[in-house]
């Protein structure tokens, strides 16, 4: 029997594992609350408590979690160094591993008629802005928990695939959405994330992303708690209510507020009671907190947060130059989208295009489980390019690996490209290679803007003849989607390498044949297609002139490649290149020769001669030979000198 691969949504506030069983995705929620497991750790002496029990005992203060508790260990993966628990340093990967062990132990419990499973391998979902270092750290944490990471998938992509997979006719739905814009609106307990996607050529592609970590569901809970404190203070004539709270009661009240928010999000519930016994260290009626909150109060308290979150929609659409009418589907996920005010705001903007999900807080984990079950693979959504020399002097971009390349899975490192380059200008002692990607998705032209990924330099012989030093350029990508480009100079024998991880990828749907497909391994994906335009960023008016050229099989690395060598350097190595009977030199090389090669008599360059004039009695003999022998150039130069004198 094949090993079962799970899906894991390791979240900032909550985490959840899911598995495909019998043609359906089973989310392994907490057995008491029937909700995802809180991503909270309680270091209680020698014991470590994770999940619901830890969350119920945590008193969240303005400065975060109190001593002994770690709230949102996922965020610690974004920083260097340990986190401190009661003064004791804890490695972030160790803290994350505790949450993952909790999910692994929970998966071993049989439920819903499905057998228990060993959660040994999983497809992990990650935020869109989780870079290479964070991916590596999460993989290490999973390893410590005894879980292998098969591959990483962005959270909005997993959610969208889960929705597509739930449709009665997957093929028809893919055809309907082909080339159309989709907004994944994920409002969870910690953050709000918006992602614009398109399905093009059999792949889910991400077009643009926007996040806000100041409007998460926790902010709603805190406002509700403060509101209930104010009501209790007013009812019983108290002053400093927080000073009178029993130990642990602030956490208990906050937990009650989370439940209250969930209940009032149900259209059938208008009012909800809150009871916290032994709330205060006083005698009499004020000892217990008894209050009622209706939906109108909740909406009034949260109106500012809701307005800010919904305004993010306008922001991302404006960035992508889209309107509400351009969005074919708004997929609203996360626990917060059940709030009537939020759902109403989405419905007003995207009438008839906001499906009501019953699994909004589980859909990301379920999507990861379906991706594992169906054997889907990630592919590059943009090519990786290098800047090579051209006759313009500014360089042109040549693809090292094309869009659609299938990315590696667990324990794989792919040799993606091995290219030979030649140094056209070795004078600085380095060959410089810039690695870049297009700003926009889809087909690009040479003049479209690029975003630099890495700049790598390798030593070369500065006195070598142009085009003599060969550079071997190798590109590798590992299972954390971290790329390494390595340069080797064959003459000097030097080697240099750099890593970069700002890659963009999509989910290939090539392996999906029907909603009834059952799989047990990850297969290869297909090519992805172009995805529209993104507003281009402005480009600098300064350009770095690349000093490498790509190998040309027809010229064996020489011949025509001399047209990429600066004119002043050719003058040094091949003066006959500028013979008036030859048309080998390009106009730019002629300009460079005239501009940089000094006069053989006074040793001044043409710019200096134009500024200072020729030496006395020179009559233009100070100009380079190529100017003196060209009547029109000489006439123009002398006319310019005459104008400067007057």
Image (spheres, helix red, strand yellow):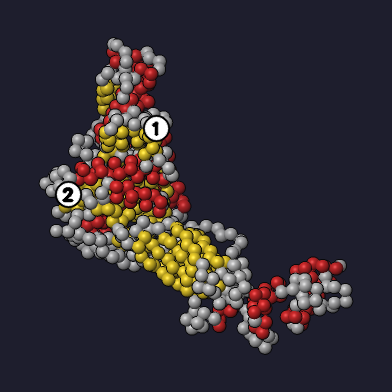
Residue 525: x, y in percent? 30, 65
Q: Which residue sits at x=46%, y=55%? A: 321
Residue 577: x, y in percent? 65, 83
Does 67 appear above or below 629?
above
Q: Residues within 10 Å of mark 2 (few under 14, many from 20)?
A: some
Q: Are marks 1 and 2 in contact (CB under 8 Å)?
A: no
Does 446 appear above or below 303?
below
Residue 456: x, y in percent? 51, 62
Q: Quadrant of the N terminus?
A: bottom left
Say whether residue 621 is left or right of residue 290: right
Q: Is 71 or 85 nearer to us in this picture?
A: 85
User: Which disc number belongs to residue 562?
Assistant: none
Q: Is 371 or 330 nearer to us in this picture?
A: 371
Q: Quadrant of the C terminus?
A: bottom right
Q: Nearer the viewer, mark 1 or mark 2?
A: 1
Element type where label 2 sits in the image: loop
Q: How far separated are the C-alphas under marks 1 and 2?
A: 37 Å
Q: Which residue is mark 2?
A: 117
Does 445 appear above or below 372?
below
Q: Which residue is mark 1?
A: 87
């Amino acid at each position: 029997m094949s090993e079962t691969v799970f899906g894991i949504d390791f979240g900032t506030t909550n985490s959840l594992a899911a598995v495909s069983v019998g043609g359906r995705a089973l989310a392994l929620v907490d057995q008491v609350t029937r909700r995802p497991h809180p991503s909270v750790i309680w270091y209680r002496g020698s014991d470590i408590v994770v999940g619901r029990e830890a969350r119920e005992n945590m008193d969240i203060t303005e400065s975060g979690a109190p001593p002994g508790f770690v709230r949102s260990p996922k965020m610690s993966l974004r920083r260097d160094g340990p986190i401190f628990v009661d003064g004791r340093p804890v490695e972030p990967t160790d803290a994350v591993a505790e949450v993952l062990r909790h999910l692994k132990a929970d998966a071993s419990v049989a439920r819903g008629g499905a057998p228990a499973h060993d959660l040994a391998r999983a497809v992990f979902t990650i935020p869109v802005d989780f870079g290479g270092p964070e991916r590596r750290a999460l993989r290490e944490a999973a390893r410590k928990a005894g879980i292998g990471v098969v591959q990483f998938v962005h959270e909005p992509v997993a959610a969208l695939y889960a929705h597509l997979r739930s449709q009665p006719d997957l093929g028809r739905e893919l055809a309907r959405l082909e080339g159309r814009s989709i907004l994944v609106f994920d409002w969870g307990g910690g953050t709000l994330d918006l992602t614009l996607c398109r399905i093009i050529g059999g792949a889910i592609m991400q077009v643009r992303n926007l996040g806000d970590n100041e409007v998460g569901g926790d902010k709603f809970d805190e406002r509700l708690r403060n509101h209930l404190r104010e009501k209790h203070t007013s009812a019983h004539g108290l002053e400093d209510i927080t000073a009178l709270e029993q130990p642990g009661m602030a956490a208990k009240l906050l937990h009650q507020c989370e439940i209250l928010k969930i209940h009032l999000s149900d259209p059938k519930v208008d009012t909800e009671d809150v009871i916290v016994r032994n709330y205060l260290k006083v005698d009499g009626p004020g000892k217990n907190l008894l209050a009622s909150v209706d939906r109108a109060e909740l909406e009034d308290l949260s109106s500012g947060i809701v307005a800010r979150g919904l305004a993010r929609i306008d922001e991302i659409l404006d960035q992508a130059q889209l309107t509400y009418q351009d969005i074919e589907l708004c997929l609203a996920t996360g626990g917060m989208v059940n709030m009537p005010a939020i759902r109403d705001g989405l419905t007003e903007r995207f009438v008839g295009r906001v499906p009501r999900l019953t699994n909004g807080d589980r859909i990301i984990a379920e999507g990861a489980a379906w991706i594992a079950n169906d054997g889907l693979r990630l592919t590059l959504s943009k090519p990786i390019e290098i800047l090579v020399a051209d006759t313009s002097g500014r360089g042109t971009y040549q693809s090292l690996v094309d869009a659609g390349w299938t990315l590696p899975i667990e324990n794989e490192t792919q040799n993606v490209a091995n290219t030979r380059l030649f140094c056209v200008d070795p004078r600085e002692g380095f060959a410089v290679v810039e690695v870049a990607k297009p700003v926009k998705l889809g087909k690009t032209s040479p003049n479209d803007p690029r975003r630099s990924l890495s700049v790598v330099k390798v030593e070369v012989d500065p006195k070598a003849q142009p085009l003599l030093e060969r550079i071997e350029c190798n590109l590798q990508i590992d299972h954390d989607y971290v790329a390494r480009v390595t340069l080797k100079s064959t003459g000097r024998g030097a080697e240099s390498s750099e890593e970069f991880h700002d890659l963009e990828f999509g989910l290939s749907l090539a392996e999906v044949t029907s909603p009834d497909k059952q799989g047990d391994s990850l297969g290869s994906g297909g090519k992805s297609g172009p995805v529209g335009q993104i507003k281009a960023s402005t480009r600098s008016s300064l350009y770095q002139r690349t000093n490498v050229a790509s190998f040309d099989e027809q010229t064996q690395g020489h011949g025509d490649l001399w047209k990429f060598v600066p004119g002043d350097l050719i003058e040094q190595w091949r003066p006959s290149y500028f013979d008036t009977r030859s048309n080998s030199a390009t106009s730019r090389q002629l300009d460079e020769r005239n501009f940089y090669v000094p006069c053989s008599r006074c040793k001044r360059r043409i710019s200096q001669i134009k500024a200072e004039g020729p030496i006395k009695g020179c009559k233009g003999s100070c100009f380079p030979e190529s100017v003196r022998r060209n009547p029109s150039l000489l006439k123009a130069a002398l006319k310019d000198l005459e104008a400067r004198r007057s």
